[in-house]
Amino acid sequence: MKIEQLHQLFLQSKGITTDTRSVKTNQLFFALKGDNFNGNTFAWQAIKKSAGYAIIDEVKYAQNDRYIVVGNVLETLQQLARFHRKYLNIPILAITGSNGKTTTKELIHAVLRKKFDTAATTGNLNNHIGVPLTLLSMKRTTDFGIVEMGANHAGEIKHLCEIALPNYGYITNFGKAHLEGFGSIEGVIKAKSEMYDHIKAHKGVIFLNADDPVQVAQSSYEHSFTFGTGKNVDVKAEYLYDSQTAQVSIDNHLYKSTLTGSYNSVNIAAAICIGKYFKVNENSISQAIGSYIPTNNRSQIIKVGGLTLLMDAYNANPTSMKAALESFSKNPAKDKIVILGDMFELGSASAEEHQQIVLTLEKMDLAKIYLVGSNFFKTHSHKSNIETYETFTDLSEALKHQKPTQGYILIKGSRGMALERVLDVLREKN
């Protein structure tokens, strides 16, 4: 079946699903494969649950004409998404970067939907499967699309751009993330800049943080719309920070937020910059920024009795970890406590990067520091306020015996550490 024909079936359907557990009537089921599963073997379940068609790539599973056999299901999904994107012919903004891309995407979405019927990546569905699903979630009524792109190896952003064909692009930053796949910070810069390469080749527009010299050097492009604290920028920003939340002042207008962490000021400024470029009015931008409430363990402020938790446990790498610590250390509150979990996907740099975090912590005025995970457990420190635990169970037992009741606690670690579990420990009654 040609992509044009499959697209017609898609337009007549109730959308795409890749999971038989959530099949809805008249959806198209794409039988994707993974390391430990073969979607072809579940296709019959999708049809039984009233899926319109099952797209498979192993002919032996085709039972009737409701099974569509293709060469490769994943490639077909990607081709269909690209075709649909061209069919809609709407502006697409792509976002990537080492840190803050999901929060920035949510802020930009909040701003742009004040003016446009906007569709954006849900959660962090930002890979070779998530990007096509995001594009296919866009409807004929959609005015504007926002697509988050993640990567852990070279060539991935290039591939995602070839699917989404973005007209606009923004890179949050270049940091020490996924070093195992990129090899070095230079590898990160080269891989993330594949978005810049695509935008330039297609004469699109780059949104640029002019305060970041590395990005300025990488972009070097006439069709850029800039923001920052220096001169000769399109949107001049002043970054402010009270005891808890990030704020930005532009043209004497103060944009307040509920986001913790001074590093979020740049994410806010990016959303304001993009909103101004697309002529969203000032009051609407301000309302969007002020009403955005982070979820899913990203820059959340959570109260537990006399404790104020700064929950930032969705992900972590050396760059984001240091930024969070530096911001937290400036908080004037007393009794500041830090709970940090291992940073993953750092490859051969892992031991050094974890030890560098410990050295950073030793210079800070913190009441107590808890480090958990096999990597942090191998670090060493001469400070008595730093405790290391190899497993979460060990940390949990320690917290139960010396549970803090007052103060501020920063909680941060890679997703695999699931440090949001600390909440349950702190909420337990002795």
Image (tube, rainbow, N blue to C red):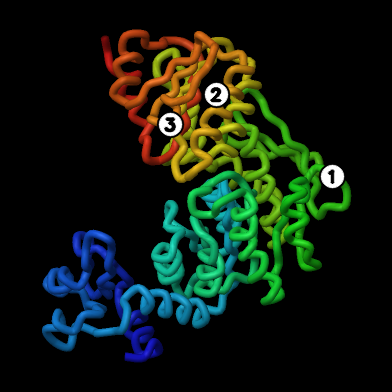
On the image, the x and y values in percent for residue 189 come to 64, 55
Q: Quadrant of residue 100?
A: top right
Residues under labels 1 and 2: Cα distance? 33 Å
Residue identifier under label 1: 230
Nearer to the camera, 75 or 130: 75
Disc 1 or 2, which lies upstream in sequence? 1
Q: Secondary structure at mark 2?
A: helix
Disc 3 or 2, which lies upstream in sequence? 2
On the image, the x and y values in percent for residue 84 come to 46, 79
* Local crowd size for mark 3, using a 10 Å CA cut-off: few (<14), some (14–19), many (≥20): many
Kind of residue sitting beneath label 2: Val
Q: Secondary structure at mark 1?
A: loop
Residue identifier under label 2: 358
Image height of 424 relative to 177, above or below: above
On the image, the x and y values in percent for residue 43 come to 17, 73
Q: Quadrant of residue 74?
A: bottom left
Residue at 31% from the left image edge and 91% from the top image edge: 1
